[in-house]
Amino acid sequence: MTTITTFGPQPRDVFERIPAYKPGRRATGVEIAPLASNESHHEPLPSVLEAIAEEALRINRYPDAAVTNLHAKLAEKFGVGADQVVTGPGSIGVLQQLLETYCAPGDEVVFAWRSFEAYPLLVEIAGGQPVMVPLRADESHDLDAIAASITDRTRIVLLCTPNNPTGVSLSHHDVVRFLDTVPERVLVVIDEAYVEYETSEDAVDSLALIAARLNVLALRTFSKAYGLAGLRVGYAISTPEIIASVRKAVLTFSVNSLAQRAAIASLDADHELAARAAEIAGERDRVVAALADTDWGVLPSQANFVWIRASGERNAALSQAFDDAGILTRVFPEDGIRVTLADAATNDRVIAVLRNTVGE
Ligand SMILES: *Cc1c(COP(=O)(O)O)cnc(C)c1O
């Protein structure tokens, strides 16, 4: 709970309700494995570091406010118009712009829960009303219940695929069926922060949905598979009409010049980064297979992390075991523990903890 002083300026009521954002724990020593925030464990590519160093010589100048070169590069990669792309300081930044654009006070934003922790906070700060629809027992989105939750006040539906923190993804077929029931005035945001790790055959083809519909937007980021979490750059792809509106809500210069250059250099290194993502996806499948016969019920994941559903004492015991092993994880005491995957040796440490901790 945020402490609000009795005297002095008073924030809006919403700030009495919402907790401060709880960041993933950070490592304090080399032997500590930082697996709490789904970052890439790979060091930045030399070509990306070179681009940043070159751009650093110009940081006395403002960045390109229109983000022209990066928008053009993204448009080229995805085969869309440059007017169909908008960038922001992380995809969280883009989501905040979206909420400012579409969500008036009291408007509802529907999403599955548990999902990305930033959703309820960003919606509340924007003055909107979060409507949280429980995941099904198999950890997937309950699209029928989400559709049934849409009211006259609903402005946005957020679908997270693969879902953070459960790792379960939606299928293209199910999303198409869902979209057919959603009124066109409701914006459907597909948050694909982990899309580069997805290997399922029926993955959502968000670009096809955007081409065919008026109300779909894909949210993506350079923070995960592209390894630029520290520079803050994310983007959205949608129709020119939606993108034109969202661009108006931009905090000018919010994508800094180093981030713009590093993102372009990363797109130039797409093959290398895709190979890294494929390596992590392979490690992920290895870890899930290695844990199939443990007490912990680790589900297949489509992201760069695994999710262990556990509450109460089970949760406390496992989170203690990870702490004792020097592994930082993301713990949700009521729901479970999320563990980011890294190199094989680190992942073996994760496997060892789960094999050696009794689940009952
Ligand atoms: C990590 C993550 C993001 C990305 O955040 P950035 O602001 O781009 O760093 C967005 N959505 C989900 C679901 C995430 O897990």
Image: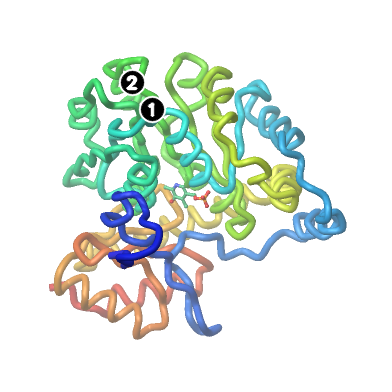
Q: Position of residue 50 (x, y in %)?
A: 82, 58
Q: Amino acid at mark 1?
A: Val
Q: How many marks?
A: 2
The response on whether ligand 1 sits within 8 Å of label 1 is no
Q: What residue does disc 1 label?
A: 188
Can you say whether 105 is above or below 181 in the image?
below
Circles 1 and 2: CB atoms closer than 8 Å: yes
Can you say whether 17 is above or below 255 in the image?
below
Q: Secondary structure at mark 1?
A: strand
> Around disc 2, counting alpha carbons within 10 Å, would you say few (fewer than 14), some (14 to 19), or many (20 or more)?
some
Along the line of sight, the residue nearer the viewer: 17 or 149: 17
Q: Position of residue 330 (x, y in %)?
A: 36, 66
Give how far apart the Cα atoms at labels 1 and 2 are. Answer: 8 Å
Q: Secondary structure at mark 2?
A: helix
- Give the label on residue 179, or none: 2
Can you say whether 320 is above or below 154 in the image?
below
Residue most extreme to the left: 360
Give the label, 1 or 2, closer to the camera.
1
> Which image quadrant is residue 134 in?
top left
Quarter of the image for the C terminus: give it. Answer: bottom left
Can you say whether 172 is above or below 136 in the image?
above
Residue lying at 68% horizontally and 25% vertically, measured from the top left: 82
Quarter of the image for the N terminus: give it. Answer: bottom left
Q: Position of residue 354 (x, y in %)?
A: 29, 73
Left or right relative to 35: residue 260: right
Q: Amino acid at mark 2?
A: Leu
> Which image quadrant is residue 189 in?
top left
Q: Earlier in the sequence, mark 1 or mark 2?
A: 2
Along the line of sight, the residue nearer the viewer: 4 or 341: 4
Q: Position of residue 233 (x, y in %)?
A: 61, 47
Residue lying at 27% horizontally and 64% vertically, measured from the top left: 332
